[in-house]
Amino acid sequence: MNRFSALLHNYEIPSYITPLFWQHGEKEEILREEIRQMNENGIGSFIVESRPHPDFLGEKWWYDLDIIIDEAKKRKMKVWLFDDNAYPSGFSAGKIRDNHPEYLKVYLAEKHIDAIGPLKGSSFIVKAWLEEGDKLVGVVSAERIDGMDKIAAESLIDITSRVVDGILYWDIPEGNWRVFILISTRNGGEEGTRDYLNPLEKEPVRAFIDYIYEEHYLRYSSEFGKTIAGFFSDEPRFGNAPSYDAGLGKKCMEFPYGGAGEPSGNYQVVLPYSSTLLKKLDIQSNGIIRRYLPLLWYEGGEMTSYIRYTYMDVVSRLFAENYTGQIGNWCREHNVKLIGHVVEDNGAHARLGYGCGHFFRAIKGQDYSGLDVVYQIWPEYTSGRFTTPFGYLYSEFFYWGIAKMASSAGHIDPKKNGITVCEIFGAYGWQEGLKLMKWLTDHVCVRGINLLIPHAFSPKYPDYDCPPHFYARGENPQWRYFHIWSQYANRVCHLLSGGTHIAPVAVIYHAEAEWAGKYEPFESVVKTLHIRQIDCDIIPIDTIVNREALTIGYGSLSINNENYKVVVLPYAECLPVTFMERLLELADNKIHVVFIGGFPIRSCEKEIEFKYIIEKLKKSTYCIKLNHEELADKLTGLGFNDIEIDSYEEYLRYYHYIRLMEDIYFFTNESKNKSINTNVRFRKECNPVAYDALEDKICKLDYKVENGVTSVKLNLEPYESIFISLNYEKDSTFITTASQITVSDLINDFLVNVDWKVSTATASEYPEFKLQSRIKDLGNISIPAILPNFSGTIRYEASFDFNVSCSLESIILDLGEVYEIADVKLNGQDAGIRICRPYHIDVTDCIIKGLNRLQVDVTNTLAKTHGNNSLDRAMPQEPSGLIGPVSLLY
């Protein structure tokens, strides 16, 4: 039986929702109650987040964890363990700071002295630049060529051997020179992670495992792989700068927002460092790296690209191997999994600072791919940047890049089995209700996410730490509708799991290009493709160079069963020669290679053979140079589009998935206001049907089949989504006679001259309502003259006459604008609940000829009551109530 049928036959499906469950040391009954609430509302597992707990690894922690595991075990739920008591992971509950200070982070810093030569017999007091605990790594001199900061790479001289007792003795040659003093130091970097382990070395991470992972295994080994599913790692990082934008060569970095206790303005840049790093750099550079280290900070011609690429290549590999890789291996050896995510924000995934150099390398050691969405993605914020409590966020990366990047790692890594987790919904403020949650769910799932980590359940109320909190000790008025969202999310994730994603295009990940020179981020290409309904995966250079799960065939490239017809490269000034060689191999096998904006002009490795390879690529029939405006049309002309759309639909997204020969498409409308009415064509003759995962029903589609192509009429209102199966196992019991309805084609009968009775109830008062006699009509109640601070449920009651024949095929109640959940009863019958647009309720079975009694309960969020916080104040607040107009469509 396929999954459509299984869902409609009410077969039990797994839960794909694993929320964070915050711990503060609450009483046993509260912990058990929170778990019960989760379990009874569609949640099958959770992550025990220890960050707020007052006694992590102490007696109270183990006592609470005993209770949590016991309750989860009784309910057959899975438990994941947050792997530290602080955010981000890597603090080791202070154990490394207290017991192994030699394992803490160190940095490479540069100080410099400018000097004009010639001057024989000169000396420099190097030791005066070293603070307590610092160590001298080396001293290098270079000639300045612009009177400012650019240096002549060929003039670099390693003069470390001339340092005696902390004094450099060096005859300054003629010219304008700079003496660089290179220091290993504990000073500088991100203050909040100063006492974190050094992720570049094996031993510090092993100590972290011993203090955290081994301690939990010691007590709960019998539950590992059973109730305890694994560990969650949260945003480990280099932390050499408190910045998303910590790229090499940036002498001064601005902290992205003025957080309390954090530095702002310009400051000295230090770089991740360790003795192992220096040894690896020496090996990879054939022993020349020390002489050229100043190029990590300063421009010095073409050699700069090579040195920066080499440094980032080595430092990102060390992080991946010693941190994520080592922890992941320990987990698998102990029959559990490692999940979580790194910092991806604003492109940090390919940088230092908050990043860890290379997303795909850093995430490789995990059993699932992962990302987080915290306040960063909003409907229709598709380009530019916008201000948030977390500073400026760049919409293009978050809207088009982050989820696609993460799901691609889940697709191409065999170990991950196609699973990508997304920490989601956190820190949006109380303004975030089920409406936005449904939109966000669609947004990430249509890009390949299939396991959700809602942020968060907190047994503390009110908890001002990164709301919303879903249950909120029963005070969240939308909680009684949470199961509608969770059932929907579980259905969507179930249909998008256990199979293979289908996309025609492989877009190359840009990290190496960014390290070495001018570049374009991959998300620019994703946007160009997605607004024209051409799907893709993001592929790292490593996968292609190292042939990781890769097969090259004639005309197609296969990576872990994902098949791509064309490879697209965002503009890159520099690329590795080894990768260019592989591109030539692809072209020789008739796989199209598209360079956006131009061909690379040099290698970020050695120049050997680069010119020869690039000339061969330029002459190849299968290598072309295009700009963004040409890309979609060219790929369509080559037949590399999976589907065809009749009209330009910039808000239409799709995801093609196959499981056990079940060929399904997931379509979503990402607009808040614009409807989509178009035709979609599939290159297959079939009898398609649609599945509405929110309503849990199958419906027929209007379609026609001609010349091997099936054309389907697709109607999606804002916030709507639909699955289309091309080979559904027909079961007439579950197929309705109705097609997808275009409401604009129906008669609109407005309910006018209706007297509305309005009453209210907070979450704690519900279901006891208070009459609001001053409210006489529909409209926004959150205005000064009415109830600007009310959070809860507003009940609207009215009677109306309906004198049209009730034998109509369908009669729909259109509520118009609603903020934001609508729960409708008609003539005492439950007619339906809507958590988002469209607020259309089928009342065919409830309406009667003559006088009808209508009740609409509208529930808003806690933003009106608890909105005085840094999150809610940063975004516009929506109205509250039933705005209307209310009408009948038939």
Image (cartoon, rainbow, N blue to C red):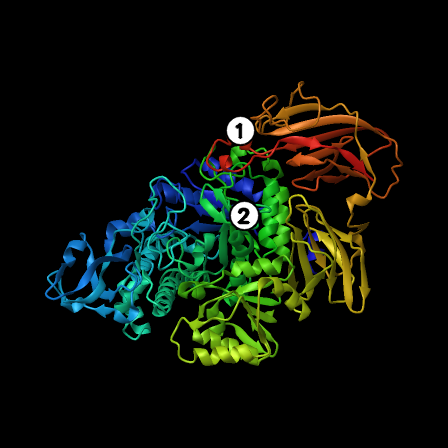
In the rendered image, which quarter contains the N terminus?
Answer: bottom right
Q: Position of residue 722 (x, y in %)?
A: 69, 52
- Which amino acid lies under the numbered mark 1 shown in the image of this protein? Thr
Observer-nearest of 791 and 67: 791
Q: Position of residue 152 (x, y in %)?
A: 29, 67
Front disc: 1 or 2: 2
Q: Above or below — where is 253 with respect to 704?
A: above
Q: Earlier in the sequence, mark 1 or mark 2?
A: 2
Task: Name the mark on residue 865.
Answer: 1
Is residue 708 something one can see in this rendering?
yes
Query: What secondary structure is marked by label 1?
Result: helix
In the rendered image, which quarter contains the C terminus?
Answer: top right
- Which amino acid lies under the numbered mark 2 shown in the image of this protein? Ile
Left or right side of 789 for 637: right
How many angstroms separate mark 1 from mark 2 (CA)? 24 Å
Question: Is there a contact, CB below 8 Å, between mark 1 and mark 2?
Answer: no
Mark 1 Cα-neighbour bin, 10 Å: few <14, some 14–19, many ≥20: few
Observer-nearest of 546 and 221: 546
Q: Which residue is mark 2?
A: 377
Q: Position of residue 197 (x, y in %)?
A: 31, 55
Residue farthest to the top? 773
Observer-nearest of 39 and 318: 318
Mark 2 Cα-neighbour bin, 10 Å: few <14, some 14–19, many ≥20: many
Count of numbered circles on the image: 2
Is residue 15 something one can see in this rendering?
no
Q: Position of residue 593 (x, y in %)?
A: 56, 72
Left or right side of 431 for 484: right
Task: Name the mark on residue 24.
Answer: none
Observer-nearest of 572 and 582: 572
Query: What secondary structure is marked by label 2?
Result: loop
